[in-house]
C-alpha cells in the first residue's frame, strides 16, 4: 500500500462512532466510552488524526493525542489504532509524522506515550520514531498495575522521545 491509497486528516465528531468501532475491533486497546471518542474527534482534532482508505472510505487508522498542559512542547499520544487489514504498512508511523508536521505542533519537541510491557508494536513504533529523528528516548515507570481499578491491567511505562528537530 502507498500513502496515495490513504487520506490522512483531522477527525471530526462525525468520525467518533467509527473510531470507537475501530478501537473495539482492534481487540487489544482499552475501549473507552463512545462519548470519549466523539470528544477526541471534536475537541482534540488538531492533535489527533484519522486515516481513510480511499477505495472503501473506511477509517483504518486513528491516533488520539494532546499537547501536555504542563509541558507545551510535548505531544502526548493516548491511543494508536490501525485496522488489522492495514497493519505492516507503516501506517502508525506515517500518522505520527503527519501529526508532528502540522502547524499546530510546530512547538512540539517531545513525544510521550504510555506503553504496556507486552505491547511490542507500540514499543517498536516509539523507539522507531526516536531512530527516525536520531534523538534520545527514555523509558520509566508511570502507572503501576495496582493503580488501575480493575485487576489484570499491566503496568504502563512512559516513553519520552526527543528532542525532535523537524
Image: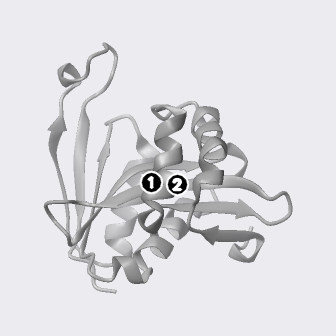
The percent coordinates of residue 149 (x first, y second) are: 26, 17
The percent coordinates of residue 3 (x first, y second) are: 69, 74
Question: Residue at the location (31% across, 13% down)?
Answer: 151
The residue at the far right in this view is 55
Question: Residue at the location (20% across, 76% down)?
Answer: 163
Callout 2: 10 Å neighbours few (<14), some, many (20+)? many
Q: Give 20 or 156, whichever is nearer the viewer.
A: 20
> On the rendered image, what quadrant is the N terminus found in?
bottom right
> On the rendered image, what quadrant is the C terminus found in?
bottom left
Question: Residue at the location (18% across, 24% down)?
Answer: 147
Q: Are marks 2 and 1 in contact (CB under 8 Å)?
A: no
Question: Residue at the location (22% across, 48% down)?
Answer: 158
Callout 1: 10 Å neighbours few (<14), some, many (20+)? many
Establish if 88 lies above or below 16: below
Q: Secondary structure at mark 1?
A: strand
Hey, which quadrant is residue 21 in on the image?
Answer: top right
The residue at the far bottom in this view is 166
| Relative to 145, 95 lies left or right | right
The percent coordinates of residue 160 (x first, y second) are: 22, 59
Establish if 124 lies above or below 55: above
Rounded to the nearest angstrom, the CA distance separating label 2 from label 1 is 8 Å
Q: Which residue is mark 2?
A: 41
Q: Give 58 or 166, whichever is nearer the viewer.
A: 58
Depth check, mark 2 against mark 1: the one in front is 2
Hey, which quadrant is residue 5 in on the image?
Answer: bottom right
Q: Secondary structure at mark 2?
A: helix
The residue at the far top in this view is 151
Of the image marks 2 and 1, the number of the one nearer the N terminus: 2
Instruction: Count the numbered circles shown.
Output: 2
Q: Which residue is mark 1?
A: 64
The percent coordinates of residue 40 (x first, y second) are: 46, 51
User: Which of the colour schemes (rainbow, by chain, secondary structure, one colour) is used?
Assistant: one colour
Amino acid at each position: 500500500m502507498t500513502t496515495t491509497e490513504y487520506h490522512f486528516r483531522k477527525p471530526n465528531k462525525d468520525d467518533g462512532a467509527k473510531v470507537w468501532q475501530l478501537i473495539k475491533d482492534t481487540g487489544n486497546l482499552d475501549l473507552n466510552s463512545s462519548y470519549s471518542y466523539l470528544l477526541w474527534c471534536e475537541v482534540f482534532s488538531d492533535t489527533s488524526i484519522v486515516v481513510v482508505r480511499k477505495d472503501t472510505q473506511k477509517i483504518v487508522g486513528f491516533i488520539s493525542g494532546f499537547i501536555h498542559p504542563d509541558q507545551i512542547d510535548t505531544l502526548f499520544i493516548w491511543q494508536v489504532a490501525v485496522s488489522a487489514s492495514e497493519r505492516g504498512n507503516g501506517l502508525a508511523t506515517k500518522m505520527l509524522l503527519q501529526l508532528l508536521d502540522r502547524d499546530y505542533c510546530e512547538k512540539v519537541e517531545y513525544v510521550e506515550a504510555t506503553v504496556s510491557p507486552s505491547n511490542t508494536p507500540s514499543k517498536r513504533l516509539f523507539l522507531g520514531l526516536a531512530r527516525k529523528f536520531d534523538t534520545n528516548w527514555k523509558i520509566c515507570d508511570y502507572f503501576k498495575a495496582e493503580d488501575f481499578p480493575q485487576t489484570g491491567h499491566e503496568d504502563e511505562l512512559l516513553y519520552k522521545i526527543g528532542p525532535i528537530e523537524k
